[in-house]
Each structure stands twice: as C-alpha cells, then as structure tokens.
Image (cartoon, helix red, strand yellow):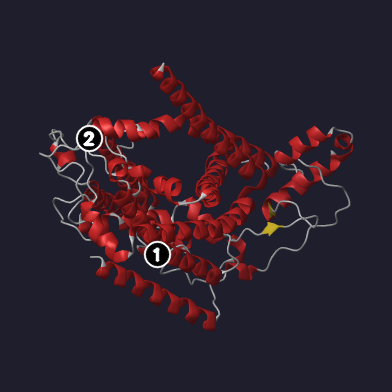
Amino acid sequence: MHSAEQLGNRSYKSLKKLYQHVWSRCSHCVSVVAGGLAAVIYTDALQTVIMLIGALILMGFSFSAVGGWEELHNKYWEAIPEIRDPNTTCGLPRPDAFHLFRDPVTSDLPWPGILVGMTIPSIWYWCTDQVIVQRSLAAKNLLHAKGGSLFASYLKVLPFFMMVLPGMISRILFPDEVACGDPVVCKAVCGNPVGCSDIAYPKLVMELLPTGLRGLMMAVMIAALMSSLTSIFNSSSTIFTIDLWRHFRPWATEWELMIVGRVFVLVLVAVSVLWIPLVQASQGGQLFIYIQSISSYLQPPVAIVFMAGCFWKRSSEQGAFWGLVLGLLAGCVRMALDFVFPAPQCHEPDERPGIVKYVHYLYFSIILSLFTLAVVVIVSLATEKPQREQISRLTWFTRLDRADPSRVEIAVLPADGGTAVPEKEAERAENGGAPNPRKESSSSQASEEGGSRLKSVFLWVCGMERKKEGGGPASPPPDIAVCSLAEDPCLRHVVNANLLVCMCAAVFLFAYFA
C-alpha cells in the first residue's frame, strides 16, 4: 500500500512538472509571437526589477539564518552529510571553496582557464550572441548602447552575493540534501545519483521564506526563465528568417517573413519541450558545469572569427569560413567524447582517455581558440585581400570612415505606423516588382471586415491585420545621421568614468576572493 502511494505521488509530481514545463514554454511562445522584440524588451525591464527584489529578500533571509558573513565562513567547513563513505572525499567541502583562483592542475576551475578560457566564450556571448546584440541594436544611439552595457555589467556583480553565497548557505543549513555524498541518498533526494547541488537555491526558497514571499520568488524564477526563453525565441526567429529563409527566397515580402518567423517560434517551442528530458539526464549533478563545458566547445571559434574580423583588416571571408568550420568540428569531437566518456562519480576511478581526463574544458577552450586563429590567419593570407570598400566602417580601424549614401539602405516608414520596408523594396513594389505589403493589406480590407472575431484575432497574431486605405503617403526616410558614431562629449566622459569604476570593482572582487 505504501509503495503504491509513493508511486502515485511520484507520478503526480512528474505530470505536474511536465505540465509546468509545457505551459511555461507555450505562454512564452504566445508572448514572443504576439509582441516580438518590443514585448521581449518591455517584459525584461519589468522582470529585472522583480528578480532583483526577490533575490535581495532571499539573500537577507539566508544571511540571517546562518548568522552573517563570519558564521558562513566558519560553518561551511562543518557542512558534511551524515551518510557518506569515510574513505573518500565525497560530500566534503572543497578546501578552495572561498577562492576564485584555484590550482591550475588539480582544481575543478583552474585559474588560467577562468582568466583566459572562460573569457573567450564570454566574448562570444556579450559581443556576438543575438540575444544580447539585439538589445544593443535597439538603442537610439551609441551612447545609449554603451550605457546599457555598463548597467548590465553593474548588475552582473550582484549574482555573486544574491546566488552564489546563498547557495553556500543552503549547504550549511541542509547538508544531508544539498551536499549528499552517497548515490543512493542523492537519488532519493533529487533523482540524480551524482549530486544534488542544483537544488540549493530552491531549497532556500521552500524552507526559509513565508508563504507570500514564496510566491514572489516563484514569480522571480518564472520571470528569469521567461526572460531567457523570450530572448532566445525572438533571436532564433530573426536569424532563421533573415539569414536562412531570405537566402533561399530573396523575393519574400515582409508579410511572408513575419509569418515564417512566428511559425518557426512554434517549432522551437515543440523542440524545447522534447529536449527537457535530455538536459535533465545529461546535467551530471551540476548544471552550471554542463553549460560552461558546452560553451567551451562551441563558442570559441565564433569569438575568434569575430575578433579577427574586427581587429585585423587582412582577414578574409574564406579565412572566417574555414576557421568556423574546422573550429566547430574540433569542438564537436571533444563534446562527443564528453558524452561517450562521462566523468566518474566521486567514489569511482577515472578511466577516461587522456584528452578528456587531463585536458580541462577551460584549457580546451584556449587550445581551440588558438587552433581557430591559426586557420583564419593561414587561409586569409593564402587568399585574396579584402577591398577597402568591403571593410569600410566594419572594422575597428575603419569605423570612422565616411558613410557612402549610395550604399546605405534606408527604411521607408508608412504613415499609418505599419512595418518599415526597405527603400529599394518599396521602389520595386511601386514599379510592378514584388507586391507592396501595405497596398496588398489595404486592398483586402473589404473582404476581412465581415470576418468573425476569432478570425480577426488569428490574423492579428500572424501579423496579417488589414489597414484602412487613405493612410497617406509614406513618411520621409530618416536622416543619414543615424549611421554616425558621434557622441556627446559630456555624456561620453560620464560613460567612460563608469567604465573605470566598473573595472576597478571587478579587479577588487577578484583580488579579494583570489
């Protein structure tokens, strides 16, 4: 009877968890499909405030429960689970737990790998990832983009105090669950025999906070999830429609691109729901380590090609292409080896191949970056040099070149507030080429007025709502000054001063916790 009850509870929890995953992704899909980038930016701004408030409250409760910073430092070494193998180090706190710079050979995060190997994937994320780049490109001018990046850098200091330290406190308060050292116990606690460190933060939420604040923290975690998913869905949709769909269908109209992008979001939602069990099965007890290792295998080639294109005018298209291809191929081989030869558990011997056992993933990031750079340099020098007009305003050394008006494609903004259409596309539509989305929409107004409300909602979600005729001529194109990199001198000094403050704060934290 007791076994049947346990089975029923487990089945209920599994179905509930699956329902939450599916429902959260579907709701995020509706948000992205209906609102696009504007919805992503506005919701992210609101969710940032919610996340900061909730995380700061939990941090206060955590430090209050443990007794402050000194007690955290003293009690952490005593956070040892009762059930563990006394002949091993399983379940024991790491002796370098309070240090950022750890042993370069035997530690889990060697300090050369952190300084160099982790910096390279970070360059990919903060400088080339569409999720981040779309926010910078949405800025009104260069100063706004710089200010947004600096504000994000200030916020990045907070997770150490709001997430890392509370996670260590969770180990002190719940050592038998968070720091379990026996596979059987870990399997019973969190369903993962490798370890249960991933439940540290949720455990604090459920055990320390009162009922009302639990709801707030639930909103915080859902907001964090929604922020990431909406950004990824919107960015992936943009990449698919602009870089892939338009390549195979160059005559595609703005209307078609909008529909294709939103359908692609639906496909992404389905794939993400199906991918959930694979992520849960391969996280290996530490989801953060899993994410960082995958990043070290796939992101360095993109970062190196990006930096070579920005700071070396001799870099060619062929060099970038072969650098990406060979670099990603090498990274995928190492990633496949990690899946084939997973890391052993604490009490098991390490029988993995030497390339996996002795080459840390952060060190592999450095090796992969050097390999990609060598390919880019060799192939670029062996191929034709790019022409001056091909790299004008596209590298650091040519960024101040004078803009050529004949090469700048300016968007024509409809007077009725519709979607911007490139000027060349608008002219082609007026001359009998590709159909003009605005005219096509206006001509179909009469046939849509009699439709049902459900049909109207469907058309609105798919971006096919019809505009009334007589909206007036298109507004004049924006001034060519939008292409300028000029900055207000006073505000530029303010931004530069904040950059120095942020860099000094980072250096101080590194030195203090080194």
Q: Write the residue at 53% across / 83% down.
A: 490
Q: 20 or 10: which is nearer to us?
A: 10
**10 Å neighbourhood of mark 1: few (<14), some, or many (≥20)?**
some
SS for callout 2: loop
Location of residue 101 with respect to 205 vertically, above or below? below
Q: Where in the figure is residue 176, as x and y percent of width and height?
A: 28, 41
Q: Quadrant of the N terminus?
A: top left
Give the residue pinned by disc 2. 182
Front of the two marks 1 and 2: 2
Q: Write the residue at 39% across / 18% down.
A: 3
- The mark nearer the N terminus, 1 or 2, is 1
Query: How many callouts does the rendering have?
Result: 2
Left of 296 or right of it: where is 146? Answer: right
Q: Where in the figure is residue 255, as x and y percent of width and height?
A: 70, 41
Location of residue 26 with respect to 413 vertically, above or below? above
Q: Where in the figure is residue 492, as x and y percent of width and height?
A: 50, 79
Residue type at mark 2 is Asp
Q: Where in the figure is residue 458, as x and y percent of width and height?
A: 74, 35
Location of residue 79 with respect to 64 vertically, above or below? above
Q: 227 or 99: which is nearer to us?
A: 99
Q: Residue 406 falls in which quadrant of the image? A: bottom right
Left of 186 or right of it: where is 29? Answer: right
**10 Å neighbourhood of mark 2: few (<14), some, or many (≥20)?**
many
Q: Write the residue at 39% across / 61% down.
A: 64
SS for callout 1: helix
Q: 225 or 133: which is nearer to us?
A: 225
Residue type at mark 1 is Val
What's the distance in space between the residues labelled 1 and 2, CA to CA? Answer: 34 Å
Q: Residue furthest front?
A: 1
The numbered dot on residue 157 is 1
Residue 34 visible within the image = yes
Residue 294 visible within the image = no
